[in-house]
């Protein structure tokens, strides 16, 4: 039987309305200037998200989210399932790459001030994506249910306790009780594979829609000077360049995953004391160190309370940054840019300090 | 194009380094499944005399292996490793193939990018501005 491909394609086009999308892609243009390279970080995030989904599904085929089965099932993935250790390693490293690139993407937007009007909502959804990515990492860290992950989760879920009014409730909700137990593991697994993917897809859809609606931003100085910035067609010129970046990143990811595959520590013992040198994932290190430098008591309140409140204020301020920096070309805009540099240095120094 | 050239250079360097990296991974061979099984067997053997000293009733034959397995507690972290020479070879071959195909793909993508940029600069797909469109003497327009 001969299949008429033209009819087949027309049927799809009719049902899915693909022609307007293709037309849009051919008409869409990407500005070309000295900061254009940062545009590629956006699509790289999508690449790592895709890898996370694929490897995550592969791991979920064998993982058992129970107190008795969690560590053993990961042990089985690493020792019995063909190339299971490599899939786990790619999943673990890909999450690191994903969060690192989300951070680089946001920093690039901060320093180029691309969050300015009319892209405030794009920045805010981007911040939400960063937070969701970090929660993904936090919930995934417990799943191997080994000594280190248990202790790190105990420390991590204890932090919200210092939040005024709702802190105790948040901690109890995260743990599924007063302490980290098997219920916490089941809860974290549910968040990791069900709730967070739904949340990230919803926010991502809005984010991409906003990027398409407002288009890519041009440098501030060009916008002020009303200079016409040269552009490149999205298809095929920009997409082809993106593919080059994706290929290189894919190669680097696989190289690192092969050379530095994570091991599996001993099964967590709920009754055992916390092991020495408990550290969270790298992206929480500076927050961890910030909490450590505060004294136990600061007058009528605890040091942890002051630290958590300060961190919350900083997060809220960054979330509403486009509204705070409402005149990016002025003096306030420059101060905010310097604050970004100071914040970056602070995060790097405190992360290194935490590792020492 | 300079950035693309730098990336291409990076990939080519990686192609050279990839087999070296794979070999380096081979040299520090961590315990494999077989080794893990040996460790477990050694732990079980150590625990055996103590179990023998206890005058406990013998469990049913069918349940015996499962009960023995549950008694063995892992004392060493599991280090990721190849499960055998077959898997090791497959991974190294895949690794070299991956970087080689990335290098080849980037080579062709560079050509494609160059061509796409040339076509764009030549305004090939833009509607043509015909110098004769308003000319009433034009034979085509005249029709």
Image: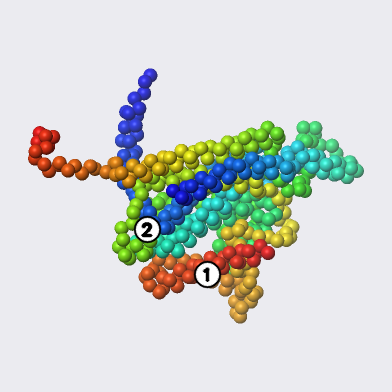
**Which residue is drawn at the image coordinates 46% and 44% (left, top)?**
A243
> Does the CB distance between marks 2 and 1 fall below 8 Å?
no
Earlier-in-chain disc, 2 versus 1:
2
Viewer can see residue B17 = yes
Marks 2 and 1 share the same chain: yes
Q: Is residue A29 left or right of residue A131?
A: left
Q: Which residue is label 1 attached to?
A: A342
Q: Which residue is label 2 attached to?
A: A217
Query: Which label was assigned to residue A73?
Result: none
Question: Could you say where residue B76 lies in the image, as x and y percent from the top left?
Answer: 76, 48
Relative to A127, residue A61 above or below: above
Q: In whole angstroms, how far apart are the C-alphas of marks 2 and 1?
A: 24 Å
Secondary structure state at the residue bearing disc 2: loop
Q: Is residue A202 left or right of residue A15?
A: right
Could you tell me which quadrant the C terminus of chain A lies in?
Answer: bottom right
Question: Could you say where residue A189 lies in the image, as x and y percent from the top left?
Answer: 58, 49
Question: Could you say where residue B123 lies in the image, as x and y percent from the top left?
Answer: 29, 44
**Which residue is drawn at the image coordinates 64% and 75% (left, top)?**
A295
Secondary structure state at the residue bearing disc 1: helix
Q: Nearer the viewer, residue A23 or A167?
A: A23
**Which residue is drawn at the image coordinates 58% and 56% (left, top)?**
A138
Are there few (<14), some (14-19), or many (20+) residues within 10 Å of tag 2? many
Chain for disc number 1: A
Viewer can see residue A189 = no
Are there few (<14), some (14-19), or many (20+) residues within 10 Å of tag 1? few
The number of callouts visible is 2
């Amino acid at each position: 039987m001969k299949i008429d491909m033209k009819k087949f394609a027309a049927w799809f086009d009719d049902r899915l309305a693909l022609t307007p999308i293709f037309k849009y892609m051919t008409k869409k243009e990407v500005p070309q200037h000295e900061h254009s390279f940062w545009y590629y970080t956006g699509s790289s995030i999508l690449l790592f998200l895709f890898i996370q989904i694929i490897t995550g599904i592969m791991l979920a085929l064998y993982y058992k989210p129970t107190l008795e089965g969690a560590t053993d099932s990961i042990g089985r993935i690493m020792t019995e399932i063909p190339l299971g250790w490599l899939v786990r390693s790619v999943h673990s490293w890909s999450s690191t790459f994903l969060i690192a690139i989300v951070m680089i993407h946001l920093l690039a937007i901060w320093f180029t001030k691309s969050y300015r009007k009319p892209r405030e909502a794009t920045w805010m959804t981007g911040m939400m994506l960063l937070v969701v990515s970090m929660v993904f990492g936090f919930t995934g860290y417990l799943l191997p249910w080994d000594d280190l992950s248990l202790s790190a989760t105990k420390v991590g879920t204890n932090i919200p306790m210092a939040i005024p009014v709702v802190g105790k409730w948040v901690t109890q909700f995260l743990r599924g009780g007063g302490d980290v137990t098997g219920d916490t593991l089941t809860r974290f697994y549910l968040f990791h594979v069900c709730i967070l993917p739904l949340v990230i897809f919803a926010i991502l859809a809005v984010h991409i829609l906003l990027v398409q609606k407002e288009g890519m931003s041009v440098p501030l100085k060009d916008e002020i000077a009303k200079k016409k910035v040269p552009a490149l067609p999205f298809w095929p010129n920009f997409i082809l360049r993106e593919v080059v970046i994706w290929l290189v990143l894919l190669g680097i990811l696989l190289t690192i995953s092969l050379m530095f595959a994570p091991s599996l520590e001993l099964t967590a013992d709920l009754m055992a004391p916390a092991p020495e040198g408990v550290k969270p994932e790298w992206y929480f290190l500076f927050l961890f160190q910030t909490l450590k430098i505060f004294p136990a008591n600061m007058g009528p309140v605890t040091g942890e309370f002051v630290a958590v409140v300060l961190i919350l204020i900083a997060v809220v301020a960054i979330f509403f940054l486009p509204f705070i920096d409402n005149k990016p070309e002025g003096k306030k805009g420059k101060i905010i840019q310097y604050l970004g540099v100071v914040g970056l240095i602070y995060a790097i120094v405190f992360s290194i300090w935490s590792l020492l | 194009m300079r950035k693309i050239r730098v990336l291409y250079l990076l990939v080519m360097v990686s192609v050279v380094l990839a087999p070296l990296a794979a070999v380096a991974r081979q040299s520090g061979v961590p315990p494999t499944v077989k080794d893990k099984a040996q460790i477990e067997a050694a732990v079980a053997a150590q625990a055996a005399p103590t179990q023998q000293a206890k005058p406990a009733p013998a469990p049913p034959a069918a349940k015996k292996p499962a009960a023995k397995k549950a008694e063995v507690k892992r004392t060493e972290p599991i280090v990721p490793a190849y499960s055998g020479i077959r898997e090791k070879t497959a991974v190294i071959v895949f690794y070299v193939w991956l970087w080689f195909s990335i290098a080849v793909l980037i080579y062709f993508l560079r050509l494609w990018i160059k061509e796409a940029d040339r076509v764009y600069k030549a305004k090939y797909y833009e509607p043509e501005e015909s110098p004769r469109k308003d000319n009433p003497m034009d034979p085509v327009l005249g029709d």
